[in-house]
């Protein structure tokens, strides 16, 4: 059995992750961590997640919890994840992180830790979204520069980063396939007399509201026709199941930075 600890355990994803680990073959929940001062520190993780008492109390001490675990599942925020990676690199433990909103500098820091330990870092752990990444590559290859590309994403009103990590990755996949530099061509703002759309740009639009789990559409817009590649998440469970799958996959891997395309063998 692989021993798994979940950090951000009382969060929206944390609760789903506890359930997914309990249900996954070959995985055992050995620890659950929250930030110091969180009201659920000391609560049984299983009771909180609604899967029955597990005898695993939520702790605020990552290092001690990780000394008894093989892998950490981290769905928190980039600055928290970087601290967690530092602790896990020191202890030689594996990390599966779904945190989003990394700046290029933060991503480089994560890459440096991944030279010491195996790390899966993926802004979207759903199998469907990762299938979409592959479909987007194919669509961009076929449609080339003749179609304008726009990405629109919708999320709940508590989401902190924008655009979503998944939307950015979708934009990057299209840009890379078309030989463009995403950071040069991504257009996040159109307001006032901003001029005509350039041929190269990739529009990135966001909608926030209510309890939308996550929806992404990439539009390829040509003259007289339009292709839309869409993904709609109905619940958070498939992200959590994807993270459990990443834990099973990473067990025999060496140090390196991996993503869900590696886990799902889509490369
Ligand atoms: P959330 O706010 O509900 O949960 C985050 C949890 O992390 C909170 O309980 C918070 O107390 C805890 N936390 C904060 N600082 C901490 C610290 N220093 N130590 C331990 N715990 C700490 O957020 P959420 O909706 O669960 O999302 C969390 C992250 O997962 C976000 O970055 C989100 O974008 C990402 N996400 C990724 C995927 C994916 O498939 N990769 C899917 C959904 C959400």
Image: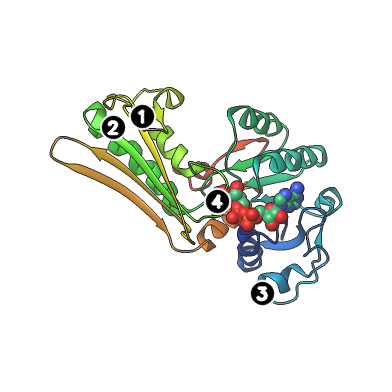
Give the residue at mark 4: 159
Report crowding for label 2: few under 14, some 14 to 19, many 20 or more residues within 10 A (C-alpha).
few
**In contact (CB < 8 Å): disc 3 and disc 4:** no
Residue 64 x %, y %: 86, 51
Report crowding for label 3: few under 14, some 14 to 19, many 20 or more residues within 10 A (C-alpha).
some
Residue 92 x %, y %: 78, 41
Give the residue at mark 2: 141
Spatial CA span between label 3 and label 1: 43 Å
Query: Which residue is situated farthest in the left direction here?
Result: 224
Give the residue at mark 1: 177
Report the number of discs: 4
Counting residues from the start of the chain, the first of labels 2 and 4 encountered is: 2
**In contact (CB < 8 Å): disc 2 and disc 4:** no
Query: Which residue corresponds to the image point at 65% horizontal and 40% vertical from the top-left?
Result: 78
**Which mark, residue 51?**
3
> Would you say residue 98 is visible in this rendering?
no
- Which of 160 and 179 lies nearest the eye of the viewer? 160
- Which of 169 and 259 lies nearest the eye of the viewer? 169
Identify the element where label 2 is drawn: helix
Counting residues from the start of the chain, the first of labels 3 and 4 encountered is: 3
Residue 99 x %, y %: 61, 45
Counting residues from the start of the chain, the first of labels 4 and 1 encountered is: 4
Spatial CA span between label 2 and label 4: 32 Å
**In contact (CB < 8 Å): disc 4 and disc 1:** no
Q: Is residue 141 left or right of residue 99?
A: left
């Amino acid at each position: 059995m692989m021993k798994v600890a979940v950090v951000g355990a009382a969060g929206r994803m944390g609760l789903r992750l506890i359930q997914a680990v309990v249900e996954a073959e070959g995985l055992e929940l050995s620890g659950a961590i929250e930030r110091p001062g969180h009201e659920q520190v000391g609560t049984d993780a299983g009771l909180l997640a609604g899967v029955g008492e597990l005898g695993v109390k939520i702790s605020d001490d990552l290092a001690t919890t990780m000394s008894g675990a093989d892998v950490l599942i981290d769905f928190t925020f980039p600055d928290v994840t970087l601290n967690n990676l530092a602790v896990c690199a020191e202890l030689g433990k594996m990390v599966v992180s779904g945190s989003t909103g990394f700046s290029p500098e933060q991503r480089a820091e994560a890459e440096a830790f991944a030279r010491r330990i195996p790390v899966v870092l993926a802004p979207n752990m759903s199998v469907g979204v990762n299938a979409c990444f592959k479909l987007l590559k194919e669509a961009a290859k076929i449609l080339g520069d003749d179609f304008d590309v726009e990405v629109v994403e919708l999320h709940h009103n508590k989401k902190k980063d924008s655009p979503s990590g998944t939307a950015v990755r979708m934009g990057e996949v299209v840009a890379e396939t078309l030989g463009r530099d995403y950071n040069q061509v991504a257009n996040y703002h159109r307001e006032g007399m901003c001029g005509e759309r350039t041929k190269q740009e990739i529009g990135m639009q966001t909608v926030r509201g209510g309890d939308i789990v996550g929806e992404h559409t990439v539009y390829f817009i040509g003259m007289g026709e339009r292709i839309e590649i869409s993904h709609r998440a109905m619940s958070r469970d498939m992200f959590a199941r994807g993270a459990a799958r990443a834990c099973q996959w990473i067990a025999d891997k060496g140090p390196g930075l991996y993503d869900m395309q590696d886990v799902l063998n889509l490369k």
